[in-house]
Image (cartoon, grey):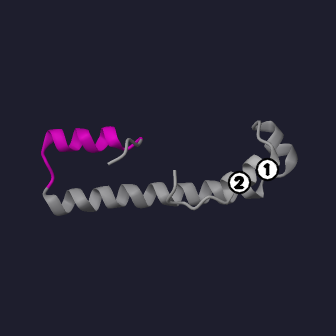
Amino acid sequence: MTHTAHAPLIAYLDAQRPLPPMSALALRTAVVLAKWSERRRTRLALAQLDDHMLRDVGLERHVAWKEARRVFWRG
């Protein structure tokens, strides 16, 4: 599993009382799906920003467009 913001929580839970294998798989699947959903939402929002907003966050239009077009399962 790759390092994510959720990794410390999963490691903590595993250290306290290891989850049954199916539960661990379900938890990891839920974490991946949540990450993908967040990426999709943020990339859609990025595509909607106007030039003024992009300047505020320090991005040029072509950079924002390239990021917004990436598929959600790629980090």
Does the magenta stretch mainly form a helix, a strand or a loop? helix
Residue kind at label 2, given as amino acid type? Lys
**Which portion, as a residue range, is magenta?**
5-19
Where is residue 63 shown, x and y percent of the image? 74, 47
The CA span between labels 1 and 2 is: 6 Å
Q: Residue at x 78, y 52 (%)?
A: 49
Q: Residue at x 64, y 56 (%)?
A: 43
Residue kind at label 1, given as amino acid type? His
Rendered position, 70 above or below 58: below
Mark 1 packing: few (<14 Cα in 10 Å), some, or many (20+)?
few
Disc 2 element? helix
Disc 1 element? helix
Left or right: where 53 falls relative to 44:
right
Which mark is on residue 34? none
Residue 13 picture quarter: top left
Left or right: where 42 falls relative to 6:
right
Circle 2 residue: 66
Q: Residue at x 53, y 55 (%)?
A: 38
Whether label 1 touches label 2, CB < 8 Å: yes
Left or right: where 69 falls relative to 28:
right
Q: Residue at x 35, y 60 (%)?
A: 30
Q: Magenta stretch: residue 14 in it?
A: yes
Rendered position, 8 above or below 64: above
Rendered position, 59 above or below 41: above
Where is residue 42 shown, x and y percent of the image? 62, 54
Farthest residue toward the right?
52
Circle 1 residue: 62
| Count of numbered labels shown in the rendering | 2
Where is residue 18 shown, x and y percent of the image? 13, 47
